[in-house]
Amino acid sequence: MASNQLSSTPEAVSPTRKSVLDLNFDEVRNFFLKAESYCNLDFPPYIRFDELINKVVEILNKNSLSGYSSKPRDHDGLNYTILNNKDGRYAWRPFQLIHPALYVSLVHQLTTEPAWQLLRNRFSEFSSNPNITCLSLPVVSLSTEKDKAEQISHWWQEVEQRSIEMSLEYEYLLETDITDCYGAIYTHSIAWAIHGKTEAKAKRTDKSLLGNQIDSHIQDMRHGQTNGIPQGSVLMDFIAEIVLGFADLELAKKINSAEIVDYRILRYRDDYRIFVNNPQDGEQILKFLTEITIDLGLKLNPGKTKASSDVVRSSIKNDKMAWIARKHTEKSIQKHLFIIHDHASQYQNSGSLAVALNDYFKRISRLRNIDQVMPLIAIVTDIAFRNPRTYAICAAILSKLINFLVEDSAKQAISEKIRKKFDCIPNTGYMQIWIQRATHLVSDQIQFDEPICKLVLGEDIQIWNCDWISNNSLKKAILNTKIIDKAKLADMDPVMSISEIELFSSQNY
């Protein structure tokens, strides 16, 4: 049997970040109400939500939203959905900007002193088994880095590096994840997770129960639907952790009943890494996890469930291992880009691809001139077309390459060609936002279907349905507060800076 010395080691304390569970109720409220927490998508810096959230907070002033509105769930289109293509083909993921009034109201419900203490106590129960470790709770940056950057560093240190350490104790690694986790979460299961199934079902109509309050808010956001939670905010990441933490607790009970003791599980959101010395133990744990997730309305992804006896190699993603092993650069700018394009064709949409493109951007950023720019633009556009994860960094590279063209007419023509290229695939609103950033100062006449792009162009577009709000002050604050910072937009350089896409540059990925 393996020693538990390493397995029971608590999560390392970092001087640069801390868990939201280490905050008091006032601190965590301020954390969730930050614009960076409201929307954790990466946007150009002139798209801002801080003023809007602050105005809604001021008007609601911790009061119940019911006094300001009719029933939100009776209205459709409350949240604003940005469609992001996942594979350059027909798979897509909806990211949602939650209606600001519903978002602030839910934060207020979660962060009263009694509610927050209840949640902290419940998470303490979720983590009571030292062999099952959740590593994905939101973190607060204590450094100059953004919270999201610290979250990425946290993943590298606590998932990848700790997985490698596990090879000292364990011979086998089994990996799996949950299919469409956020889209499949049953909203009633939030109350089960907080209060236990028996109490939650007995009090399913009790509006004072925190789990029911959260459930009701999410149904309000989604036209009364009970399947799925919005994806795109740190708040919803935390709510997903409530349900997944409950699954951890139920899994621990089943494993203990089966008297399996020689194991270790690391979970990062809906990704599981199960370390064992007996492969039969691993299969039994997977069976238990399957049963628990089904009971919660979730299911494991068979295509991403695998086992390996090479713990070290399996701890590192295949794309990262491949990038480490291959030549990274060439003296020729175009050959360098072909190396990256080849890696992209083998490891589509990978983290290592984003890192490779970031290094390429740094290289060309130092150049004052490049011959034969058009082929480079074509290659970068093709990479972005097939790898949606790279939209922001590819937009930055394109902004630099377009700037090498001498004639304004040539810049405008190629910008329009890039836009039209993406018309060939559906659900590319997110890419349109970044194409607009790369080309807006070349030509502000390029038309986009994405409503946020229309806002940038000065069109009067309402992206949240406010028909259900009866309070005039609240309605006006949401409808009239601009999320496009015109001064910031006017101050933008035609060539994007590395600071605009810094979160894509993590060398630890």
Image (cartoon, rainbow, N blue to C red):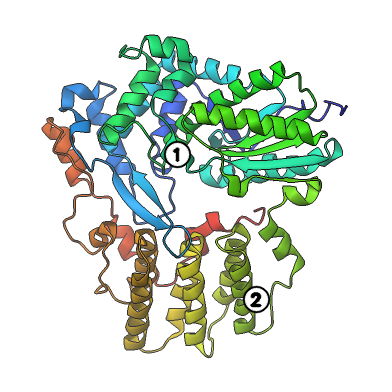
Counting residues from the N terminus, which is met first, the one under dot 2 or under dot 1? 1
Q: How many marks?
A: 2
Give the vertical position of 105 relative to 367 (above or below): above
Q: Position of residue 168 (x, y in %)?
A: 86, 39
* SS category of the residue bearing label 2: helix
Type of the residue with mark 2: Ile
Distance between the alpha carbons at the discs numbered 2 and 1? 35 Å
Q: Which residue is mark 2?
A: 339
Q: Is residue 287 left or right of residue 315?
A: left
Q: Quadrant of residue 45?
A: bottom left
Q: Residue at left 72%, top 19%?
A: 258
Q: Residue at left 76%, top 27%?
A: 9
Q: Pointer 1: residues within 10 angstroms few (<14), some, or many (20+)? A: many
Q: Quadrant of residue 360?
A: bottom right
Q: Position of residue 183 (x, y in %)?
A: 42, 40
Q: Is residue 440 left or right of residue 348?
A: left
Q: Quadrant of residue 129?
A: top right
Question: Is there any visible trace of residue 146 in the rendered image?
Answer: no
Q: Is residue 290 left or right of residue 27?
A: right
Q: Residue at left 34%, top 31%?
A: 226
Q: Is residue 351 left or right of residue 439?
A: right
Type of the residue with mark 1: Tyr
Give the vertical position of 261 relative to 355 (above or below): above
Q: Which residue is mark 1?
A: 182
Screen quadrant of the N terminus: top right
